[in-house]
Amino acid sequence: MKLKSLLLALLVISSGIAMAQVESGKVYRIVSSKYETVITASPITNALSCVTKGTETDYPQMWEFVLDEESGKYAIQNVFSRRYLQNESRTNYAFVTGNDIVLFDVKENPACPGHYNIDASNRAGGWGLHCAQNAAVVPWSYGPDGEGKVSGTEWVFEEVNISALDKDAAYENYVAYNSVLENKATIIEKVST
């Protein structure tokens, strides 16, 4: 095990954070193995970015994985917006969330045990979610930067304990937030008069 992987494992053990392979129906933060940032959905644009881990109630950073039994792949749904991770196969285009259910293959990278690739396209050789240096989540061919060295396409999953009531409250907050945005002009007009 290389130094970065060992340090991440020690951090996980010492902090009590549960890192795991995903299980259907559970909620996780998707953490970049290379940058230790978390995939976060923008409530305004639905774009994804990798940012510093937020608080326990930073719901745009929480993702529920739902297994499709037939294919063995996962739909990945944001807890805050209830929108699904969408596929993007063009480099330099960021992944977004949307209403369509898209399935992703989540598999451990054998060159980096404990680190996973999220395959977005089913291309030969792999093409998955990648945390770019500018913090955008873009498609990229995956593979380590050498034996045991993680790249921006490797991820670990931090399990989040969240109740169904908290998930519902998160979505209600999202709906209220978007209602304010949609009615911004009316609200400003009423406040100004």
Image: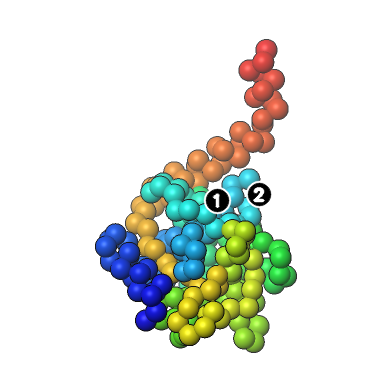
- The quadrant in which the C terminus is found is top right
Residue density around tag 2, few if under 14, some if 14–19, many if 20 or more, within 10 Å = few
Residue drawn at (38%, 75%) of the image: 3
Q: Residue 134 sits in which quadrant?
A: bottom right
Pointer 1 residue: 81
- Whole-angstrom CA distance, mark 2 to mark 1, is 11 Å
Give left or right: position of 173 versus 141.
left
The residue sitting at the front extreme is 3
- The quadrant in which the N terminus is found is bottom left
Residue drawn at (34%, 56%) of the image: 161
Front residue of 84/114: it is: 114
61 w.r.t. 191: above or below? below
165 w.r.t. 109: above or below? above
Give the foreground label among 2 and 1. Answer: 2
Q: Is mark 2 on a helix, strand or loop?
A: loop
Mark 2 and mark 1 in contact? Answer it, CB < 8 Å: no
Instruction: Give coordinates of residue 167: x percent, y percent.
Output: 43, 50
Q: Looking at the image, can residue 18 be seen?
A: no
Label of residue 45 in the image: 2
Colour scheme in use? rainbow
Instruction: Give coordinates of residue 58: x percent, y percent.
Output: 45, 48
Three-letter amino acid code at disc 2? Thr
- Report how many numbered discs are placed on residues in the image: 2
112 w.r.t. 36: above or below? below
